[in-house]
Image (cartoon, rainbow, N blue to C red):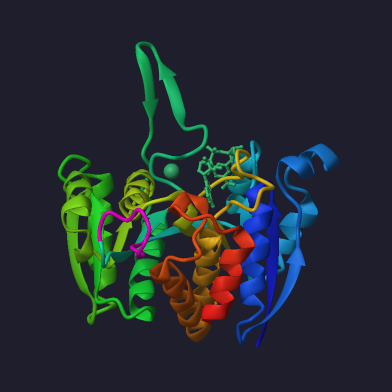
């Protein structure tokens, strides 16, 4: 059971949180081959491109990719990899952990965002005589694919309900189709409950009853906004992981950037990167290892003794990694 993992630490704290995370992965009962790739600002300075073809090839040839963070070139790097690998799903878990800035306890749901169409189509904005127009593209193929992914995710992770989020009362054609497809696809999953909400109501429910959600599936723009709302609900950039999933590959990364203000000082919280690695383990079907890793992080946070500065502690990045390894 050996996996090839592309590892792209990138810039700044990306390198530090990656080293910490790999040191924990090495303690688990899963066999990995790490193939390191370069990308980001430093790579750009040294090689004249933030994302060499060689790095793209490493990602393409791997079973999954761990990405730390890039600096100013982040958008070029990440957007290019997403396009090259046709990563159609963006996954953001919203989960509360103790001793964090989480506003609620017992929150645990997944936002599944469509990542290729909707309002975010490159070069599709147009200037008009008195303003500008953007097109919102909803295709049956892309929406069926993301909705099916959400139901399959629910099934694989013992979730019992999927919530569709849309604005079909106003956007009758585009979101009307999205909603129609949602209920069509749901027929393949008779054991999973369904519900659908308007996006504005959802923005409210997320802060009034976040514990009610299990899996949320939605179109590109709504998913972008709601996933940041979800991040705010459970606190701190140092804790929020994400995944980009495609037919040709998957990439797991913390939501935060290279944090130049604390880079090189062992102050970065590695937990967002570690939770990204846990998402990778689940993607690979290594659920036992993922559960074990997750329980170790929960233990370290619950004890509250080894926390980085962002969580009010004074531990270093590698001290947190060591505490997680001890908790395994
Ligand atoms: P940032 O996420 O790097 O930092 C924002 C603030 O949060 C800073 O005060 C930082 O110290 C803190 N922070 C972030 N992650 C932390 C962690 N793990 N532990 C403790 N504190 C943490 O975002 P910012 O400052 O807007 O951007 C800095 C650079 O990162 C820019 O060059 C930007 O382009 C890049 N960036 C890259 C991303 C990526 O690679 N996916 C995403 C966001 C920004
Ligand atoms: Mg966003």
Note whether 60 is above or below 84 in the view shown. below
121 left or right of 151 in image: right
The image quadrant where one finds ligand 1 is: top right
Number of numbered labels in the structure image: 0
Q: Position of residue 109 (x, y in %)?
A: 31, 65
Instruction: Give residue 87's position: percent from left, percent from top.
Output: 53, 57
Q: Is residue 99 magenta?
A: yes
The N terminus is located in which quarter?
bottom right
In the rendering, at what x and y percent does residue 92 appear? 41, 58
Is residue 66 shown to the viewer in this render?
Answer: no
Q: Residue at x 66, y 56 (%)?
A: 16
Which one is nearer the viewer's eye here, 48 or 211? Answer: 211
Q: Based on the displayed image, in which of its 4 quarters is residue 169 positioned? A: top left
Nearer to us in this view, 36 or 127:
36
* Nearest the eye: 50 or 235: 235
Which contiguous range is marked in magenta? 95-104
Asked if 22 appears above or below 17 in the picture, the reply is: below
Residue 17 in the image: above or below residue 174: below
Q: Position of residue 151 (x, y in %)?
A: 33, 71
Residue at image x 44%, y 52%? 312
Q: Which is the main secondary structure of the residues drawn in magenta?
A: loop
């Amino acid at each position: 059971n050996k996996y090839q993992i592309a590892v792209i630490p990138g810039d700044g704290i990306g390198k530090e949180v990656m080293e910490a995370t790999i040191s924990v992965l090495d303690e688990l009962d899963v066999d990995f081959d790490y193939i390191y790739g370069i990308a980001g600002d430093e790579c750009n300075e040294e090689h004249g491109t933030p994302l060499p073809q060689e790095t793209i090839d490493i990602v393409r040839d791997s079973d999954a990719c761990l990405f730390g963070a890039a600096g100013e070139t982040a958008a070029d790097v990440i957007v290019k990899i997403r396009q090259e690998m046709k990563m159609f799903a963006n996954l953001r878990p919203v989960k509360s952990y103790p001793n964090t800035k989480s506003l609620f306890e017992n929150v645990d749901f997944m936002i599944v965002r469509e990542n290729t169409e909707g309002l975010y189509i490159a070069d599709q904005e147009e200037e008009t005589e008195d303003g500008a127009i953007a097109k919102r593209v909803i295709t049956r193929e892309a929406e069926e694919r993301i909705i099916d992914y959400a139901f399959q995710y629910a099934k694989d992770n013992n979730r019992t309900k999927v919530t569709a989020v849309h604005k079909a009362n106003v956007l009758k054609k585009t979101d009307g189709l999205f909603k129609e497809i949602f209920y069509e696809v749901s027929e393949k999953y008779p054991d999973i409950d369904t519900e659908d909400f308007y996006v504005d109501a959802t923005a409210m429910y997320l802060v009034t009853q976040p514990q009610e959600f299990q899996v949320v599936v939605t179109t590109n723009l709504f998913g972008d906004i709601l996933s940041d709302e979800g991040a705010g609900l459970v606190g701190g950039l140092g804790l929020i992981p994400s995944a980009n999933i495609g037919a040709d590959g998957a990439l797991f990364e913390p939501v935060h950037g290279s944090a130049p203000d604390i880079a090189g000082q062992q102050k970065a919280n590695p937990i967002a990167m570690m939770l990204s690695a846990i998402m990778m383990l689940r993607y690979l079907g290594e659920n036992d290892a993922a559960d074990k890793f997750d329980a170790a992080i929960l233990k370290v946070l619950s004890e509250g003794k080894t926390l980085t500065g962002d969580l009010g502690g004074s531990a270093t990045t590698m001290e947190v990694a060591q505490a997680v390894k001890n908790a395994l």
